[in-house]
Amino acid sequence: MAHFFPSFQALHLADRMVDTVGERVPGYQGRVGAAWYWRLPGGILVTFTLEYTQTEQRWNLLRAVAASPNVGLFNAADFPFAAYATLASSPPFIHDLDGEAEWSNRLYFQMGHLIEDVVLWLEMLRAVILDPQVRPPAAFPDLSPLERELVAHAALQLDGVFLLKALYETFGERISRRRLSELAQAWEELGLLTDEHPRRITVALRSLAGVTY
């Protein structure tokens, strides 16, 4: 397999994109060389590498793979973010005064949409920790009817935020503040709530509660 040495431009652009995703998805470990890492609940390790495809156009892309100790590699996704013309009729690349080379008809994809796609893919990986092959189902509790209502209310009325004050105002006659706080802490430790503040419900918790988007 041929080695790939990315340009500084591609590396810096990928850095900015991945750092933005890292601010939104917990577990980001940073970059080593030309690869970025996440540690997700259930022992899932996600690796992003900077690579390219060679067709009529060269596409720079982030290639992502997810693995767990139990099953090894179990999911992968490619996120292209830049295209460069390589046809014989294309204008040659140009060097600027600082020695940087760029194709004159370079095209960048819409960064906002790409970042949203990466965030969604990482969030979807949280749901696979419910798979018996990835993590034993006994690691997760069966949700009571009230707990399902709490998740549904957070998802549909609070924009996915598990906000204790707002939940207590709605369900205070059925659950104490202390029990609500203990529940949130237990779910956070299981990776069913994010560890950011305010906590947000994960795709996995939505799945456990049977809440659809």
Image: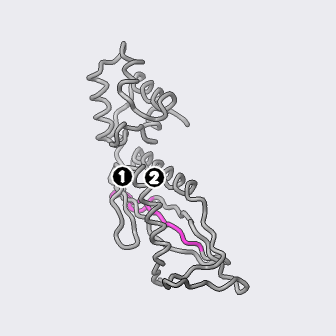
Q: Which residue corresponds to the image point at 45% horizontal and 52% vertical from the top-left?
A: 122
Residue 161 is left or right of residue 156, and the answer is left
Residue 102 in the image: above or below residue 43? below
Q: Position of residue 168 (x, y in %)?
A: 36, 20
Which three-letter amino acid code belongs to the residue tagged 1? Leu
Q: Which residue is mark 1?
A: 40
Q: Which residue corresponds to the image point at 33% horizontal and 36% vertical from the top-left?
A: 187
Q: Are marks 1 and 2 in contact (CB under 8 Å)?
A: yes
Residue 105, located in which quarter of the rendered image?
bottom right
Which three-letter amino acid code belongs to the residue tagged 2? Leu
- Name the quarter where the C terminus is drawn: top right
Say whether disc 1 or disc 2 marks the residue closer to the N-terminus: 1
Residue at the right extreme of this rendering? 89
Q: Position of residue 134 (x, y in %)?
A: 38, 51
Residue 3 in the image: above or below residue 126? below
Q: Position of residue 140 (x, y in %)?
A: 34, 38
Q: Which residue is mark 2?
A: 122
Q: Nearer the viewer, residue 73 or 161?
A: 161
Q: Report the span colored magenta.
A: 59-74
Residue 55, located in which quarter of the rendered image?
bottom right
Query: Which label belongs to residue 52?
Result: none
Q: Which residue corresponds to the image point at 34% horizontal and 39% vertical from the top-left?
A: 197
Secondary structure mostly taken by the magenta-highlighted segment of the chain: strand
Q: Nearer the viewer, residue 179 or 167?
A: 167
Q: Residues within 10 Å of mark 1 (few under 14, many from 20)?
A: many
